[in-house]
Image: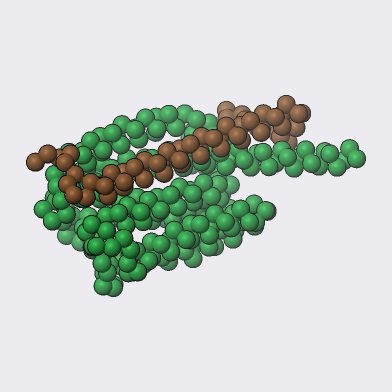
Amino acid sequence: MTLIDLANPTRFLSLTARLLPWLATATVILLAIGLYQSAMAPDDYQQGATVKIMFIHVPNAWLAMFVWGVMSVAALGTLVWRHPLADVAAKAAAPIGAAFTFLALVTGSLWGRPMWGTYWEWDARLTSVLILFLMYLGLIALWRAVEDPSRAARAAAILTLVGAINLPIIKFSVDWWNTLHQPASVMRMGGSSLDRAFLIPLLVMAVAFSLLFLTLHLAAMRNEILRRRVRALQLIQAQAGRRSL
Amino acid sequence: MNAMSLGPYADFIVTSYLVVAAVVALLIAWIGIDHRRQKRILGELEAGGVVRRSGRSATDMR
């Protein structure tokens, strides 16, 4: 099966039906391994046991940005290549990305209270992630507000690409401004500064959450294709009803 | 060192994991319920004689 074959929603649904059980199984196994390793990881010499929040906070924060990146590629697919599944992919990803961003904010807040003495600070990293969350909500509202799917797809694609400007701002906010949030410790020049005892569980959890996203995204795309078929059939039904009058 | 002794901030750690578990469970449930709902509506439309222009079943995944 080539990439162009996936432009056909029926072929995509067929592939999804075969892939989803395997992906779900792999996600559960990897999450179980990651959670076990996280539970067994030693305390940090400064942060104590609160370092365990890192194993869920960081994967959610990475995915919050990654999902918007996926939606940006899909937005190009809608505007440039007019791929039939591009808008489906973007629309299906948005609620999942919003959930990951919400979790990054909440777990960060719960980690911040014991470490920084506050749940929230209007610093560059926290504020730019909050803006990302609000942009996810705005996009979801846009798709719901515009009834014509092709007009909604174009408007959402433009908004997604404009919103992508926020991604480098989030990434480099800790370097460009003085922030309460710590600088990058995994993806940085010169390699990770994390000890292997923390790095390995963190990477396992990151892969597990990425697989979780892939599984949920494919399932949500399948739902969106079915929703569009419902809409098409309802239009056919309405047209048939008008003709019979 | 006991890896599962969560120290004075146990509430923050446990709450973090519970919130993540709850939101992920909600996402899974929402996607599962939505799938069943779309299949049910498609089934009802097809049972009412509404078919795709291609003539194929709307729930056809082959």
Establish if A13 lies above or below A88: above
Which residue occupies 35% across, 69% down? A122
Quarter of the view holding residue A114: bottom left
Which residue occupies 57% across, 32% down? B36
Q: Which chain is brown?
A: B
Give the quarter of the figure containing the C terminus of chain A. Answer: top right
Q: Residue A145, position in %: x, y?
A: 63, 56
The residue nearer to you, when weighing A178 against A194, is A178
The residue nearer to you, when weighing A157 against B16, is B16
Q: Which chain is green?
A: A
Is residue A150 visible in the rendered structure shown here? no
Q: Is residue B36 left or right of residue A201?
A: right
Which residue occupies 54% across, 54% down? A140
Q: Is residue A51 left or right of residue A99?
A: left
Q: Residue A69, position in %: x, y?
A: 42, 55
Which residue occupies 61% across, 29% down? B60
The residue nearer to you, when weighing A68 against A60, is A60
Q: Residue A184, position in %: x, y?
A: 24, 60
